[in-house]
Amino acid sequence: MSALILFGGGGDLALRMLLPSLYFLDHDGLLDPELKIIAAARSDETRDAYIERVRASVEPRAKSDDVWSDETWTRLAARLDYVALDATSADELKALKAKTGDGSVTAFMAVSPSLYGRIVPAMHAAGLAGPDTRIVLEKPVGRDLESFREIDDAVSAVFDERQVFRIDHYLGKETVQNLIALRFGNTIFEPLWNNLTIDHVQITVAETVAVGDRWPYYDEYGALRDMLQNHMLQLLCLVAMEPPSNIDADSVRNEKVKVLRSLRPITVEEAGRVTTRGQYTDYVSERGAPTDTETFVAIRADIDNWRWAGVPFFMRTGKCMAEKRTEIVIQFKPVPHSIFGRDGSSYRGAIQPNRMIIELQPDEDISLEVMNKQPGLDQRMQLQPITMSLSWGHNDRKASPPRRRIAYERLLLDAMAGDSTLFVRRDEAEEAWKWVDEVSDAWDGAAMKVEPYEGGSWGPEAADLLLSRTGRRWSSHE
Ligand code: BG6
């Protein structure tokens, strides 16, 4: 028997993401038939009442994906147990230990990271931290390098690095893994993947949702620490890393660390030119008091190495923006000379540079924009850009798309199997925090205020300037 413990099993993350993911995995026959799922939380709830709450969350989700089945639900419910306890107490954890059996144990920390440092020693004292135990840490681990180290030290005092799985749910997204396949499963892109051919890269994670009642957490973190330190830097690493020699965890993560170490620090003098902080205008009234927390950030990052010298990576993320859009745009250089006349006599009067668009949300697709001849007998050849999809669907147009998976499905499976390729190693998290701390210090040093932006827009104007002063534009402005 193997066991999955969900600390914080009654909370939002467990109910909204983890349990629906487990349902889908069970539905697809991907869970160990012997797996037991033990939810642990403080609230004094019965197992039956808990299972009802799980069902209320899982059923509508599974129905909307058309994969609800009584059989799967009965199987999942039979695996589920609920233990009301204080997870920081070793004595109380002993009761939990008795339920886990002798097989491997994976413990998912779906609780506030401030508790990690207290739960882990209690697990140790309760005999719940054996060599076959794995521990999954949800972000944010810390608020800066120092607090990250403090929490992580408490975890590392009990668990070896190979047992620690720091989640970044973006790495569980299908298109992110597809990017790895595209870069390293083909010969045709890699020779172009450098500063000779690529002009710049844009990474956008735009959300339409407001901060809402999450503000007590969010106000302490802001967009820089909530999104950029983790999800966006991970995307940047996967675009920029050198080919690893192997897809194993250490080979991939060694390459990502090198990218993070090559990020040029942002200085006080540069901060105003290469970064923008924004805040949507309703945030203060939602929060109930003025605050300097950014709900939007845009940064130009430079990677100081041979491959990327001179290729800016523009990143932006924000709440309350015009569209939900998560994408990476690889913008190639323009043709060196147009043979089609000075104005190109083509679409919009110019030949558009090629772009590869890696779209994570709302749709999942990787596409390539290329120029092509407009059909017809015009004496002057007319060009037009066309988009070629490189994603699965175009192999077989009649096939219906595979179900869109929750990123946690992949990550839960990998953690239970002990594969940490798609998890963040300690040195990686440290390097990311180091860079983000420098950004934050530069903001303080330059006394950079947040710029207001209207909800439903693409952020403050200053974010446009960040690109336009280099002669470029955000992809959303075309
Ligand atoms: C989380 C952030 O890590 O990612 C949230 O804390 C954000 O603020 C969320 O909304 C975005 O995830 P996704 O998968 O919806 O892009």
Image (cartoon, rainbow, N blue to C red):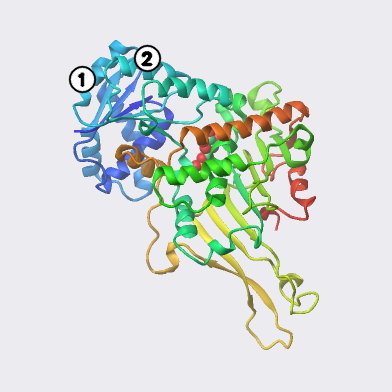
Residue 210, percent from left and from top: 60, 35
Reply above or below: 279 against 360.
Answer: above
Residue ID for mark 1: 98
Of residue 302 and residue 462, the one placed in the foreground of this image is 302
Give the image location of residue 259, x and y in percent: 57, 44
Report which residue position mark 2 lands on. Answer: 88
Query: Which residue occupies 58% across, 30% down?
Result: 212
Lower position in the chain sequence, tag 1 or tag 2: 2
Quadrant where the image shows the N terminus: top left
**Viewport quadrant of the C terminus:** bottom right
Residue type for callout 1: Ala
- 290 horizontally vs 150: left or right: right
Q: In this view, does 158 lie to the left or right of 426?
A: left
At 21% from the left edge and 38% from the top edge, which residue is drawn?
74
Residue 403: image location, x then y, percent: 38, 53
The percent position of residue 377, horizontal first and vertical second, equals: 67, 88
Location of residue 285 by image quarter: top right
Helix, strand or loop at mark 2: loop
Instruction: Identify the mark at residue 441; answer none if there is no mark.
Output: none
